[in-house]
Image: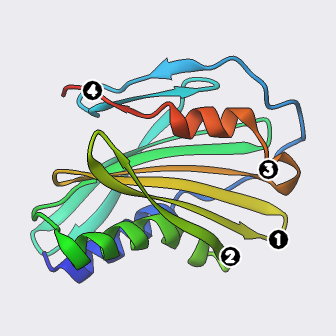
Amino acid sequence: MSRKNVCLIAATMILTTGFQQGGHKNDQTSLIEFSPKDGGFSIMMPDKPSQRDLSHNTDNGKASSPLYELTKDAFKYVITYLDYPFSAEGKERDKLLDTGAEAGITNVGGKVVSNTPISIDSYPGREVKGEMQGILYRSRVYLVRQRLYLLIVWMPTTKASSENATKFLESFKLVAR
């Protein structure tokens, strides 16, 4: 599979997440730990997310990736990951991280407000903030060996200082698979 196709797959995965704006309630909800079998991560969420598989075409045929999503109290939480058949280093790694983190907002007509390098357990990542038509977008992407993890939270602009959105993103931990 070409690296260009893999970047397009990552962007397609992000686009499939969508956003539904619900009623405005207090976002200070209790959180539960979510850690799917073989996912290699744990994260705190307001409730158990639903799961669906994302299918995408590759040079080697069809592939799928799990996507976990939850819409609750005007927020949409998304976690997905994609295993790559190659190792990305240097500029290729940076482009993969930037594309993965930014595509969710730019591909729906929004704009990136910030793109900051981050890391988890010495693995590189990006945190992106974006906005469009009264909706805020926050994402974190981590490249752990050949697995790209993507975390997204969509929220109304009136909830910009949401503790739950921050806790969701900051609670992501790598665990043994």
**Closer to the eye: label 1 or 3:** 3
Q: Secondary structure at mark 3?
A: loop
Q: Is residue 19 above or below residue 172?
A: below
| Occupied quadrant, residue 163 | top right
Q: Quick check: marks 3 and 2 in contact, CB under 8 Å?
A: no
Marks 3/4: CA distance?
A: 29 Å
Relative placement, left or right, of 125 versus 71 is left
Which mark is drawn over residue 110?
2
**In terms of sequence position, does the residue under pointer 4 or pointer 1 come before the other?**
1
Q: How many marks?
A: 4
First in sequence, mark 3 or 4: give its number.
3
Q: Residues within 10 Å of mark 1 (few under 14, many from 20)?
A: few
The disc, 1 or 2, on the residue closer to the chain's N-terminal end is 2
The residue pinned by badge 1 equals: 133
Q: Are marks 1 and 2 in contact (CB under 8 Å)?
A: yes
- Circle nearer the N terminus (1, 3): 1
Using a 10 Å C-alpha cutoff, classify the residue at mark 3 as few (fewer than 14 neighbours), some (14 to 19) or many (20 or more): some
Q: CA distance from mark 1 to mark 2?
A: 8 Å
Decide if residue 41 is on the left or right side of residue 34: left
